[in-house]
Amino acid sequence: MGLGKTCQTIALFIYLTGRLNDEGPFLILCPLSVLSNWKEEIERFAPGLSCITYTGDKEERAHLQQDLKQKPHFHVLLTTYEICLKDTSFLKSFHWSILVVDEAHRLKNQTSLLHKTLSEFSVVFNLLLTGTPIQNSLQELYSLLSFVEPDVFSKEQVEDFVQRYQDIEQESESASELHKLLQPFLLRRVKADVATELPKKTEVVIYHGMSALQKKYYKAILMKDLDAFENEMAKKVKLQNVLSQLRKCVDHPYLFDGVEPEPFEIGEHLIEASGKLHLLDKLLAYLYSRGHRVLLFSQMTQMLDILQDYMDYRGYSYERVDGSVRGEERYLAIKNFGQQPIFIFLLSTRAGGVGMNLTAADTVIFVDSDFNPQNDLQAASRAHRIGQNKSVKVIRLIGRDTVEEIICRKATSKLQLTSTIIEGGHFTLGAQKPAADADFQLGEILKFGLDKLLSSEGSSIDEIDLESILGETKDGQWISGALPLAKEGSREQEEGKNHMYLFEGKDYSREPSKEDRKSFEQLVNLQKTLLEKTSQEGRLLRNKGSVLIPGLVERSTKRKQILSPEELEDRRQKRQEAVAKRKRLIEEKKRIKEKVEHKKKMAWWESNNYQSFCLPSEESESEDLEDGEHESSAQIDYEDSDSNSIKYVIGDVTHPQAGVEDAVIVQCIDDSGHWGRGGLFTALEKRSTEPRKIYELAGKMKDLSLGSVLLFPIDDKESRSKGQDLLALIVAQHRDRSNVLSGIKVAALEEGLKKIFLAAKKKKASVHLPRIGHATKGFNWYGTERLIRKYLAAKGIPTYIYYFPRNKSAIPHAQSSPSSSGQLVP
């Protein structure tokens, strides 16, 4: 976790190729989020090693496979787990010198498809890289060992292994035996050994109260499905769902549909509705005023959406990465955060918790905690790693007297297991006996803290003194040792010790108190009484799809007030106004998002020295027209008096029949970025090398969208004595991930023709098209011809449509359309 696993691996490659004359090849599997980092580090530390990045869609990978088969040798092949599973047969055809699996806890299940697939590869040496070899159990450790040395750790002996060492935390002899067993297979690096100059990391838990709205829904969620607590059948699944809903409630009640009040305007209500966000609001204001930079982690992408709205409302600068963000955008977000003074980086714990170097931040905040504490430790190491020159503060927000407390307590036992097995016998974990998984009954966990939490219906949000809790800060840096409650001990021990979950000496038991159970029973009895009452009245208010909130039932049983026609009309108007207002807000939010994404794309293009050949939109071009000029009256001064009709030509469109004017050749393409074969694609490549090069580069730079037009000259191989030939590529088709090509989309074609008109008008150029869609079954050529006439020929642009001759003896000639029926003169 930031201790140089990547660098050590590259050093191993250099040693093998330089000293042992082992030329590989070496295979590296890693998450998509760190693919570019691996590439950069190899180029940085081992420029002599040839490295190939094996990514892309199915067609692009097919081209790479052909190149790799023809290429005599390469040193390193870099790809992801997912692509490895897709192209197993190809990758299995190589004899790999070393297989490197980054974030190797992906192999913690020896029955998983990835584990089974990689076990079949021809490999001399396996190298697994992970900061968390054990996350939950001994089975996970054995899975890694069986992958590294299957002859010693056979898959059939996993139960014997677990049985032998299951009581390792109580038996020191078993611990010593296991440490000796692991020694030949495990190279462990801790921060205290390899990063002695690394600034200190301190961790703080801050508890927050709950708003009245949160308490109301917390109670309602518990009562939503009483069968989950009483019926043993399917009990676990139901209780897990209840637990998930309670966690959402502790985060923010707006995570539930229908809770946020209309007309859905962002305001202070967003903060006041959640005790967690109320605390976070104070905390971020404190950090912002003192010049700190923050990594903000959450388990839920929906919570990240709310936090993003909050950031926009407060005006804080931020970047965001979650599982939906593409690799290129992820890389750009990381780069922007490292190079620009951005205050906050929003991340999901799973997607943003591995492989990223975010040492520009000095504060890590966990909005909610992961069931697996190793994921949180991995996430915190994005900031506290080699390269960090500031002290790091890790802040965990926990809802007081809620399920969040008991989740953190459960995580302690998992950290203790790792420390006992891996840390070499350092059993300084305190006298606290770890709770076994079997002792954690979900039904009991959900009752935790109810007595205090529901003792009053009002808000339990309190104001706190952040400086006394967090410690002193100066010039944007945490002052080491300033935290009065911090415990002494090594930094590595702090990562695994239970001080994260023990606060101010208070031990949060794994079981609810008698008072909690009593409160729960009272709640259940009240709910049953309400249900019987409503059932007797002939109205069933409770069902699986809704939440019955005690205290609101009486209001729901009252007869609805009869409104007058004027009141009904007034209500209708208000609803329409609310809908319209919400639509405007959504559109405005969409515009802002598009503007931000466009800014990111421009920065990405600039970093890659990319210049787009796309024509501007019709609207932006229309602003350049002279006052009073409208495109419908646009005329171009040509000698041809019949400029408003389409000319039909038998010939090769790649060699346009033009005079002294510039000529624009038009071709329709898809948005995949992969150049086609045969037909006009091959003919254009014979004419010029530019089309394929420019089009494929535009695809890599995400510069191909339906309706866009790439325009550029193609006079590199052949040229006319007078006038210039240009190629206009209209993106009018879509190719999906399954490589299925759509038909020509008329709306995209129409938008492209509008742009070509404006470009041809400026250049006083003629336009030359093939018979678009001639090979497409069921294509509406008549409608397409009308579009070409409407946007080009009828506006004075000399327009030619080419029919390729079936025999080479055909003599190219031009002919105007003879009749409205569209019959062509051969």
Image: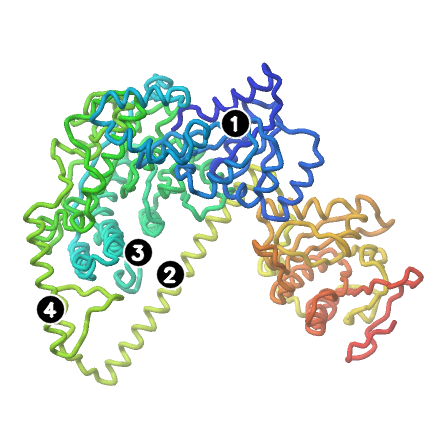
Q: Is residue 546 above or below residue 512?
A: below
Residue at 16% x, 57% y: name it.
219
> Circle 2 sits on which residue?
585
Numbered disc in front, either 1 or 4: 4
* CA neighbours of label 1 inside 10 A, class few (<14), some (14 to 19), many (20+): some
> Circle 4 sits on which residue?
530
> Circle 1 sits on which residue?
41
Q: Is residue 623 left or right of residue 783?
A: left
Counting from the top left corner in percent of width and height, residue 673 is at: 63, 49
Residue at 52% x, 20% y: name it.
11
> Circle 3 sits on which residue?
266
Using the image as rendered, state which of residue 727 and residue 208 is in the foreground.
208
Whether the residues at callouts 1 and 2 have beta carbons within 8 Å, the answer is no
Numbered disc in front, either 2 or 4: 4
* CA neighbours of label 3 inside 10 A, class few (<14), some (14 to 19), many (20+): some
Disc 1, SS: helix
Identity, as a three-letter code, of the amino acid under mark 3:
Ile
* CA neighbours of label 2 inside 10 A, class few (<14), some (14 to 19), many (20+): some
Quarter of the image for residue 740 reads bottom right
Identity, as a three-letter code, of the amino acid under mark 4:
Leu
Alpha carbon separation for disc pair 3 and 4: 36 Å
Q: Is residue 115 above or below residue 762?
A: above
N-term mark: 2 or 4? 4
Quarter placement of the C terminus: bottom right
N-term mark: 1 or 2? 1
Disc 2, SS: helix
Whether the residues at callouts 3 and 1 have beta carbons within 8 Å, the answer is no
N-term mark: 3 or 4? 3
Identity, as a three-letter code, of the amino acid under mark 2:
Leu
Identify the image's colour scheme: rainbow, by chain, secondary structure or one colour: rainbow
Disc 3, SS: loop
Can I make out residue 269 in this image?
no
